[in-house]
Image (cartoon, grey):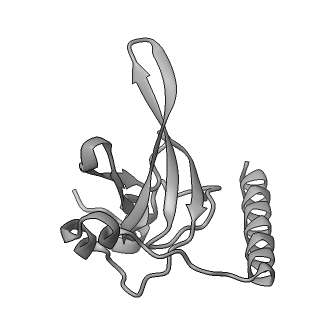
């Protein structure tokens, strides 16, 4: 059976919808809230760490978050961006990096494995906040129109 009128781009776009998450980049420290079901109870679990990679491939887009857990053991998780189990992504702080993938951080130990924080002036913070408020309001309007 042949798929009629479907291109690679349309297949990757099936199931995509706007996610009202705050905008984040590589190097940012994020807190990812995920729904966890244990038996018949459901709770939200937060995983906070640095974003070290982002794979943009339509509906199967993923991002990798790395945190340092107990006893200095690093834990990495790969989250699908469009999964319904992810309820919220909050940016804790913005990082200043010059690479698209931060896989070299895996080999670093201690303070060498940290990402520098991006220094912004008060005006830059206000404009970024205004842009994010505008983006979320436009996303909410488009979702309301589609329903």
Residue 134 percent across, percent down from the top left: 79, 69
- The structure residue drawn at horizontal position 44% and vertical position 12%, both measured from the top left corner, is 40
Residue 27 percent across, percent down from the top left: 44, 72
Any part of residue 132 in sight: yes
Q: In the visual, does 86 lie left or right of 57?
A: right
Residue that lies at the very extreme toward the bottom in this rendered image: 98
- The structure residue drawn at horizontal position 49% and vertical position 21%, both measured from the top left corner, is 42
Residue that lies at the very extreme toward the top in this rendered image: 40
- The structure residue drawn at horizontal position 45% and vertical position 64%, both measured from the top left corner, is 13
Any part of residue 6 in sight: no
- Pick whichever, 112 or 122, lies toward us: 112
- Pick whichever, 46 or 119, lies toward us: 119
Residue that lies at the very extreme toward the left in this rendered image: 107
Q: In the visual, does 75 lie left or right of 67?
A: left
- Pick whichever, 9 or 18, lies toward us: 18
Quarter holding the N terminus? bottom left
Residue 71 percent across, percent down from the top left: 26, 43
Q: Quadrant of residue 110?
A: bottom left
Query: Where 125 sits versus 88, above or below?
Result: below
Query: Where 69 sits versus 36, above or below?
Result: below
**Count of numbered labels shown in the rendering:** 0
- The structure residue drawn at horizontal position 58% and vertical position 58%, both measured from the top left corner, is 92
Query: Where 32 sits versus 17, above or below?
Result: above
Residue 128 percent across, percent down from the top left: 73, 76
């Amino acid at each position: 059976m042949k798929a009629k009128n479907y291109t690679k781009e349309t297949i990757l776009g099936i199931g995509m919808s706007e996610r009202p998450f705050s905008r984040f980049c590589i190097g940012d420290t994020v807190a990812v809230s995920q729904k966890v079901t244990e038996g018949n109870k459901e709770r939200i679990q937060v995983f906070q760490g640095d974003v070290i990679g982002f794979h943009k491939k339509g509906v199967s887009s993923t991002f990798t978050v790395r945190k340092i857990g107990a006893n200095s053991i690093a834990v990495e998780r790969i989250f699908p961006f469009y999964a319904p189990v992810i309820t919220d992504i909050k940016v804790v702080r913005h990082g200043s990096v010059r690479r698209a993938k931060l896989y070299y951080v895996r080999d670093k130990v201690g303070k060498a494995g940290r990402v520098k924080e991006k220094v912004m002036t008060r005006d830059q913070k206000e404009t970024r906040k205004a842009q994010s408020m505008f983006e979320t309001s436009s996303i909410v309007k488009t979702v309301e129109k589609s329903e």
